[in-house]
């Protein structure tokens, strides 16, 4: 149906290529011209001023869930004024003993427009449908939990 491109560029900036010495900072370029400085997570010797792949993975899941939720709300004619999510990814050993983001917890806080009433049951159903229809969640085996 569609393709989505990203170009990743890294260049050695250190004399030594020993594990503890080489730079982890690199650049993500997207087809719209957007550029993001990225690096390994600080725990893996990356620059904390950069986005790391684990954060990007969590943000990707949370963003997809939000966009799917907004589409569902719009189709139901439920005006949404704001959506904020403090998503958390858990890096731990998986069943095979390998490090993986095994669980992503979404904690969305939605502000509906004035006069819009949404029951707890309807909100839970909208989140269930959002997760079920999120392209990214459908692409990974990580558990995604909406709190």
Image (cartoon, rainbow, N blue to C red):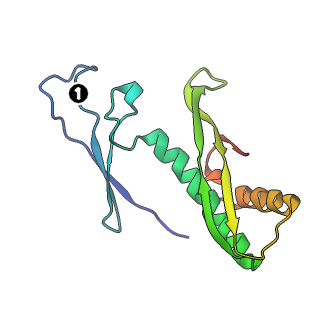
Q: Is residue 39 visible?
A: yes
Image quadrant of residue 10? top left
Q: In this rendered view, identify the residue nearer to me: 108 or 103.
A: 108
Left or right placement of residue 4 versus residue 124 in this view: left
- Quadrant containing the C terminus is top right
Q: Name which residue lies at 28% across and 43% down.
A: 26
Q: Quadrant of residue 100?
A: top right
Mark 1, Cα crowd under 10 Å, few <14 / some 14-19 / many 20+, is some
Q: Position of residue 71 (x, y in %)?
A: 67, 72
Q: Residue shown at 24%/32% (left/top)? A: 23
Counting every numbered tag in the picture gives 1
Most foreground residue, 123 or 45? 123
Report x, y in % for residue 25: 27, 39
Q: Which residue is mark 1?
A: 22
Q: Is residue 140 left or right of residue 44?
A: right
37 or 18, which lies in front? 37
Name of the residue lying farthest toward the left? 15
Residue at x 40%, y 33% (from the top left corner): 41
The answer to whether 77 is drawn above or below residue 69 in the figure is: below
Quadrant of residue 75 in the image?
bottom right
């Amino acid at each position: 149906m569609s393709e989505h491109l990203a170009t990743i560029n890294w260049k050695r900036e250190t004399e030594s290529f020993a594990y503890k010495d080489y730079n982890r900072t690199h650049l993500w370029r997207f087809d719209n011209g957007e550029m993001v400085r990225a690096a390994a997570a600080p725990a893996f010797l990356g620059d904390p001023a950069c986005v790391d792949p684990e954060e990007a993975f969590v943000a990707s899941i949370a963003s997809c869930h939000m966009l799917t939720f907004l589409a569902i709300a719009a189709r139901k004619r439920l005006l949404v004024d704001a959506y904020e999510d403090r998503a958390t990814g858990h890096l731990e050993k998986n069943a095979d003993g390998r490090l993986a983001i095994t669980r992503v917890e979404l904690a969305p806080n939605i502000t509906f427009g004035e006069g819009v009433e949404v029951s707890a049951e309807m909100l839970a159903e909208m989140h269930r449908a959002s997760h079920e229809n999120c392209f990214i969640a459908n692409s990974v085996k990580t558990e995604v939990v909406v709190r």
